Image: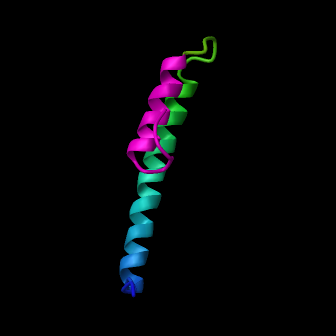
């Protein structure tokens, strides 16, 4: 039977997840809005790799 994680640890993990998610979305957004006149595939791939590394997506492509 799996051990229960204390509520304080669950809250701490969730706060860490939200912090990671915040940083990731800010980085992705700033990469995308840097230049609205071009569509650079590199930034899209880089953002997907960052999200995968942070554990916010499934396996990277």
Where does residue 5 sit, x and y in percent of width and height?
A: 38, 82
On screen, residue 4 above or below 31: below
Q: Which residues are magenta?
A: 41-61
- Kindly identify the residue that appears in the image at 37 percent across and 72 percent down: 12
- Kindly identify the residue that appears in the image at 54 percent across and 18 percent down: 41
Q: Is residue 34 magenta?
A: no
Quarter of the image for the N terminus: give it: bottom left
Give the camera-side residue of 21 and 6.
6
Where does residue 28 sit, x and y in percent of width and height?
A: 50, 35
Q: How is the image coloured?
A: rainbow
Give the camera-side residue of 5 and 23.
5
On screen, residue 48 above or below 43: below
Q: Would residue 38 appear left or right of 30 to someone viewing this image?
A: right
Where does residue 46 sit, x and y in percent of width and height?
A: 44, 28
Q: Is residue 56 magenta?
A: yes
Where does residue 18 sit, x and y in percent of width and height?
A: 47, 59
């Amino acid at each position: 039977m799996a051990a229960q994680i204390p509520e304080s640890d669950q809250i701490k993990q969730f706060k860490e997840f939200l912090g990671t998610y915040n940083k990731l979305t800010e980085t992705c957004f700033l990469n995308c809005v840097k230049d609205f006149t071009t569509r650079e595939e590199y930034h899209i791939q880089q953002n997907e790799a960052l999200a995968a590394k942070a554990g916010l997506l499934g396996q990277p492509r």
